[in-house]
Image (cartoon, helix red, strand yellow):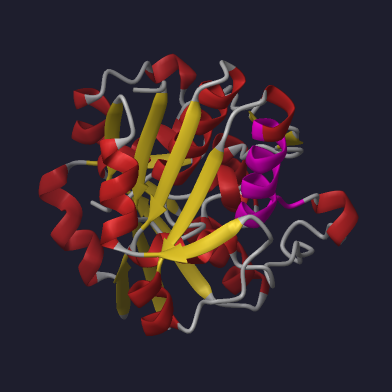
Amino acid sequence: MSKALTIAIMDAPYESANTTTAFRIIAAALAKGIDVNVFAYEGAVALAMKDQQPHANPVRGTTVEQEDHPTTRAFIAGLLALAQEKGARLQWVNCGLCVDERGAGNWIEGVRRGGPPDFLAMVEGSSNTLVIPTR
Amino acid sequence: MRILNVVETAYRGTLEEQDDTVLWLTAALKGQGADVSVLLRGNAVNYLVKGQDSTGLAIGPVTLGHPPRLDEDVQKLTEKGVLVFAVREDARDRGLDPGRIISGVEFISRTDIADLLEKFDQVWHW
């Protein structure tokens, strides 16, 4: 079995530190050349939405540029770029039914639709599986 | 109308948001003239610890330019006239060093929370 890690995540963007933790684990694995499979379930399907935009901060009085607000889609794009750079494979699969429920189907390039069979296939092809659920 | 924002869930998306969204909303509402106060309880009392530093986050080539500075954000709220309360026992249970707590915060006992709530027209528990 190749060295690969599967991660299932559930939290929607901007709601939980779980997402940042998942991103960091994914980045650390990719940096070591380990393949990573992500199954984005429930609210996590919105992490890759293409229409996410940085914004200004009226409370701080900062512009969009000054605020330099990150988006989760940018983080995912960064992870995909990191995978390419390190010669590792990052599969990012959004749960299709979760997407349909939310009308959340407009993603950045590199993300694909899937379901439990894809998740199972990823699990079976991995050294281990890490589940990071919503609490 | 007097509003109390009770913040209990801490560090909820604060890295992605670059702040705590409830503290942010509090500042925005105060800026609009609302009479709004804050009660920090549970893990949120940790926002009061001075010198928190979450700089350096990088996800691949994407870096976090402006990490959250929650202690400073709470301090700014107090400077804007927002009353900030915190539960003494929650701070003690977590071993927070009193010497590292920001100024301008009023600590209350758990047994005084009900009395505090009575002073507000609306209580929003986040």
Q: Is residue A80 visible?
A: yes
Query: Observer-nearest residue: A106 or B15?
Result: A106
B92, above or below A67, in the image: above
Q: Residue at x 18, y 55 (%)?
A: B113
For the magenta stretch, what is the residue range?
A: A69-83
How many numbered marks are there? 0
Q: Is residue A41 magenta?
A: no
Residue furthest out toward the front: A1
Q: Residue at x 69, y 32 (%)?
A: A82
Seen in the image, is B51 located left or right of residue A95?
A: right
Expressed as whole percent of the image width and height from the top left, the position of residue B20 reads: 52, 51
Expressed as whole percent of the image width and height from the top left, the position of residue B71 reads: 55, 35
Quadrant of residue B90 in the image?
top left
B24, above or below B67, in the image: below
Seen in the image, is A88 located left or right of residue A38?
A: right
Q: Residue at x 69, y 48 (%)?
A: A77
Expressed as whole percent of the image width and height from the top left, the position of residue B46 reads: 39, 33
